Amino acid sequence: MLPIRPATATDIPRLHELIERAYRGDGARAGWTHEADLLRGPRTDAASIAAIVRVPGRGFLVAEEAGAIVACVEVSLRGPIAYLGQLAVEPTRQASGLGRAMIAAAEAHARAHGATTMEMTVVDRRTELIAYYGRRGYVPTGEVRPFPPELIEDTPLSLVVLARLL
């Protein structure tokens, strides 16, 4: 498996490109985790990524190969509960075990910083993604959060909260 390290400010442009490739647009359809048919507009922007990278207790872990970031995951430490988000794997490398490795690295990072629970949100209509996380020990908490309506392509969406004990 590839080495996984914390992202730095110099990684921001490459992180942004990877996240967009993995979640939006026609290129995202090469993988199975895209949101290209559900949501419009960009997934994120460089300023939002920079805000995450530069805030203590928040950041991204990245896997890099030959100078390219091929996977990333956001980890935000919130005391006993950490948040896992923006898991992105290069679309042509999905189903290779990289996502699983990134989740394990995020969980280890959170545990090392005192977290006892990892939480995430998943778009409610992404049942295959909810099942994927379920196979990794994440279960619905019963909480549902609203999804920003300006990003929705057609049918209203919400975010299902999943969690697992670390």
Image: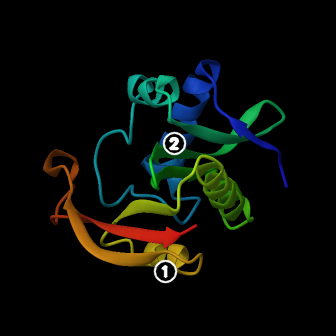
Q: Name the foreground residue: 101 vs 35.
A: 101
* Three-letter code for the amino acid on which mark 1 is drawn: Ala
Q: Give me the disc on residue 131.
A: 1
**Labels 2 and 1 touching (C-beta < 8 A):** no
Look at the picture and state if 141 lies above or below 81: below
With respect to residue 21, does 125 lie above or below?
below
Residue at image coords 52%, 71%? 165
Q: Residue at horizontal 62%, vertical 58%? A: 107
Residue 19 is tagged as 2
Q: Please state the horizontal and vertical placement of residue 3, each as a whole percent of the image.
A: 82, 44
Q: What element carries label 1?
A: helix
In this rendering, the answer to whether 17 lies above or below 92 is: above
Residue type marked 2 = Ile
* Left or right: 108 in relation to 31: right
Badge 1 local density, few (<14 within 10 Å), some, or many (20+)? Answer: few
Q: Earlier in the sequence, mark 2 or mark 1?
A: 2
Quarter of the picture holding the C terminus = bottom right
Spot occupied by residue 5 in the image (x, y as percentages of width and height): 73, 38
- For residue 159, what is the image quadrant? bottom left
Q: How far apart are marks 2 and 1 (CA)?
A: 21 Å
Q: Which residue is drawn at 62% across and 55% down?
A: 111
Give the numbered dot on residue 10. Answer: none
Residue 147's spot in the image, x, y percent? 21, 55
**Label 2 residue SS:** helix
At x 46%, y 55%, the residue is 80
The x and y percentages for residue 133 are: 52, 73
Decide: few, some or many residues near mark 2? Use Cα within 10 Å; few <14, some 14-19, many ≥20.
many
